[in-house]
Amino acid sequence: MPPQRRAAGPDSATAEPRFLQVQTTTDSRAEAVELAQAAVEARLAACAQVAGPIASTYWWEDGIERAEEWLIMLKLPADRYDDLASFLSERHSYDEPEIIATAIVAGAPSYLDWLQEETRPRQ
């Protein structure tokens, strides 16, 4: 019998997801590492990964821009999203930073428990 996986997403079609992966980009590795570490230290995410450089192409001020960027991926319970989004908005160097969330629809139960535990505020 295969191991059971606990759903991380909604229990029904209308329920909110329980866990998210949030991503943002920066134009420097140093800023990406600093944002990742600060978010984890603040327990807004249990884990943050930095990847890059990546090649980005996007519209900005009526023109197409191309840039080398660094991707930050953060894993967290969905109920921590608003706090993380505010944190990233306040600390990010971009005027309009990418802050998007994707639902984690399933995962290893022990990993999801770890995500929950490591984002609880410590007293």
Image: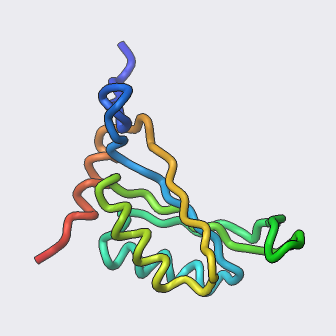
Quadrant into which the C terminus falls: bottom left
Question: Which residue is depicted at the point 36% across and 38% down?
Answer: 8
Residue shown at the point (19%, 70%) measured from the top left: 121
The single residue placed furthest to the front in the displayed view is: 62
- Looking at the picture, tell me which residue is in the foreground, 19 or 48: 19
Between residue 50 and residue 17, name the one nearer to us. 17
Most extreme residue toward the top, as rendered?
Answer: 1
| Image coordinates for residue 117, horizontal then vertical, percent | 22, 58
Residue 45 percent across, percent down from the top left:
37, 65
Q: Is residue 34 above or below residue 59?
A: below
11 over 43 or under it: above or below: above
* The N terminus - image quarter: top left
> Coloring scheme of the render?
rainbow
**Position above or below: 59 against 101:** below
Residue at the extreme left: 123
Query: Going 42% across and 51% down the picture, which residue do you hit?
Result: 20
- To which quarter of the image does residue 7 belong? top left
The quadrant where residue 96 appears = bottom right
In this rendering, position of residue 36 left or right of residue 96 = left
In the image, residue 53 lies at what x, y percent? 75, 71
Whether residue 90 sits left or right of residue 83 in the image: it is right
The quadrant in which residue 5 appears is: top left
Q: Is residue 11 left or right of residue 107?
A: left
Is residue 52 found left or right of 48 in the rendered image?
right
Residue 11, position as x, y percentages in the image: 30, 29
Q: Nearer the viewer, residue 61 or 39?
A: 61
